[in-house]
Amino acid sequence: MAWVFLLFAGFGEMTAMFFLKLSDGFQKKGAAIGAIAAGGVSFYFLSLSLLDLPVGTAYGIWTGIGSVGTVLLGILFFKEGFHAKRLLFILCIISGVIGLKLVS
């Protein structure tokens, strides 16, 4: 279950960053509350995953899921640029996450 909790934590991180962008610097209260709530959910599931996983592995994978997911959300919803260099570095993050999973 630790890996499932870690996956939920990563999706919570993505959701928190999505709402943080929508909050417009915490000026839009509904989105700001969504960001805080999603961040709390993310930390909760991360803490559950840490009961069974090494902290370095869990943190690296959590940030990897959050980073890649947030970049993709930015491209899809906020018209952020997508080009070959970005794809290359996203693939680097994904390969690091896979590597951490394999050695754990």
Image (tube, rainbow, N blue to C red):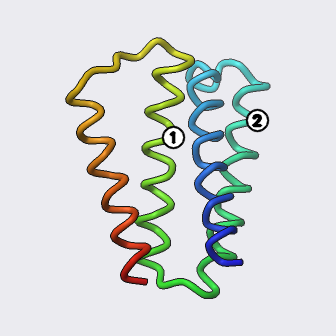
Q: Residues within 10 Å of mark 1 (few under 14, many from 20)?
A: many
Separation (CA) of disc 1 from disc 2: 20 Å
Residue situated in front as seen by the camera: 41 or 99: 99
The residue pinned by badge 2 equals: 33
Residue 31, percent from left and from top = 72, 26
- Quarter of the image with the C terminus is bottom left
Furthest-left residue in view? 85
Whichever of labels 1 and 2 marks the residue nearer the N terminus, that label is 2
Residue situated in front as seen by the camera: 85 or 45: 85
**Vertical side of 25 occupied by 8: above or below:** below
Q: Amino acid at mark 1?
A: Gly
Q: Amino acid at mark 2?
A: Ile
Residue at (69, 68) in percent of width and height: 5
Furthest-top residue in view? 79
**Vertical side of 39 occupied by 4: above or below:** below
Residue at (51, 40) in percent of width and height: 69
Q: Is residue 64 left or right of residue 18?
A: left
Residue at (31, 61) in percent of width and height: 96
* Location of residue 9 (image quadrant): bottom right
**Vertical side of 10 occupied by 45: above or below:** below
**Which SS class for mark 2?**
helix
- Quarter of the image with the N terminus is bottom right
The residue pinned by badge 1 equals: 69
